[in-house]
C-alpha cells in the first residue's frame, strides 16, 4: 500500500488516505487543537488561530463536522451565536495529536536546520 495520491477510483477505500487527506490540510489539526480546551464560538476560534480566513475556517469546520469530529450548535439570537465542540470521536484524536505536537516542538529547530542546510541534487535543479 502506498500513501501517494492515486488515480484509481477505488483509492478512496484506503482508510489511511481517506482520513489523513482530510486531517492533513492546513487548518484541521489547528482547529482540533484549539477545541481541546472546550467549546468555542466561531470568532474566538478564528482569533486563536490567527491567520485563517473566515471562509477557510468555515469550510474546515464544516468538513470536521461532516467527519464527526466537531459538533456545531446554533443559538437563536440576533446575531446568531454558533459554538463548536469536539465530539467523542474528536476527543479520541487528541492523544495522537498531542504526540505529534510534542514531536514538532521537540524537533522544530532540527527540522529548520536541515531545511537550511539542504542542497538540491544537480539532477533536480536542472529540471
Image (spheres, rainbow, N blue to C red):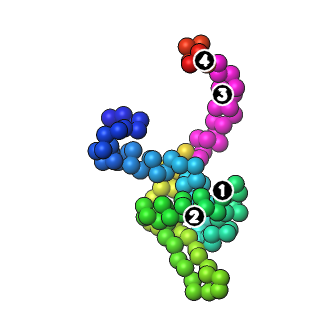
Task: Indicate which label's residue lies in the foreground, 2 or 3.
Answer: 2
Majority secondary structure in the magenta region: helix
Q: Magenta residues?
A: 101-119
| Residue 121 visible to the viewer | no
Disc 1/disc 3 C-alpha distance (Å) = 25 Å
Per the image, the residue denoted by label 4 is 125
Question: Does residue 95 lie above or below 89 as drawn?
Answer: above
Q: In which quarter of the image is residue 56?
A: bottom right
Q: Earlier in the sequence, mark 3 or mark 4?
A: 3
* Farthest-out residue, left: 10
Q: How crowded is mark 4: few (under 14 residues within 10 Å), some or many (20 or more)?
A: few
Q: Quadrant of residue 110?
A: top right
Q: What element carries label 1?
A: loop
Per the image, the residue denoted by label 3 is 115
What residue appears at the point 38 percent right and 45 percent down from the top-left corner?
Answer: 16
Q: Earlier in the sequence, mark 2 or mark 3?
A: 2
Per the image, the residue denoted by label 1 is 52
Task: Indicate which label's residue lies in the foreground, 4 or 1.
Answer: 4
Q: Earlier in the sequence, mark 1 or mark 3?
A: 1
Q: Which of marks 4 and 1 is nearer the N terminus?
A: 1
Disc 4/disc 2 C-alpha distance (Å) = 39 Å
What residue appears at the point 36 percent right and 34 percent down from the top-left corner?
Answer: 2
**Badge count:** 4
Q: What element carries label 2?
A: helix
Q: Which of marks 1 and 2 is nearer the N terminus?
A: 1
Disc 1/disc 2 C-alpha distance (Å) = 10 Å
What residue appears at the point 64 percent right and 18 percent down from the top-left corner?
Answer: 119
Where is residue 94? Give x, y as percent: 51, 56
Q: What element carries label 3?
A: helix
Where is residue 36? Give x, y as percent: 57, 62
Per the image, the residue denoted by label 2 is 58
Amino acid at each position: 500500500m502506498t500513501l501517494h495520491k492515486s488515480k484509481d477510483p477505488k483509492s478512496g477505500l484506503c482508510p489511511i488516505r481517506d482520513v489523513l487527506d482530510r486531517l492533513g490540510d492546513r487548518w484541521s489539526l489547528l482547529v482540533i487543537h484549539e477545541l481541546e480546551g472546550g467549546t468555542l464560538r466561531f470568532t474566538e476560534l478564528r482569533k486563536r488561530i490567527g491567520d485563517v480566513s473566515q471562509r477557510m475556517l468555515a469550510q474546515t469546520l464544516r468538513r470536521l463536522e461532516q467527519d464527526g469530529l466537531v459538533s456545531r450548535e446554533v443559538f437563536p439570537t440576533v446575531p446568531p451565536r454558533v459554538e463548536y465542540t469536539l465530539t467523542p470521536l474528536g476527543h479520541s484524536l487528541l492523544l495522537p495529536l498531542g504526540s505529534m505536537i510534542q514531536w514538532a516542538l521537540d524537533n522544530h529547530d532540527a527540522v529548520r536546520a536541515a531545511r537550511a542546510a539542504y542542497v538540491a541534487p544537480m539532477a533536480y535543479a536542472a529540471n
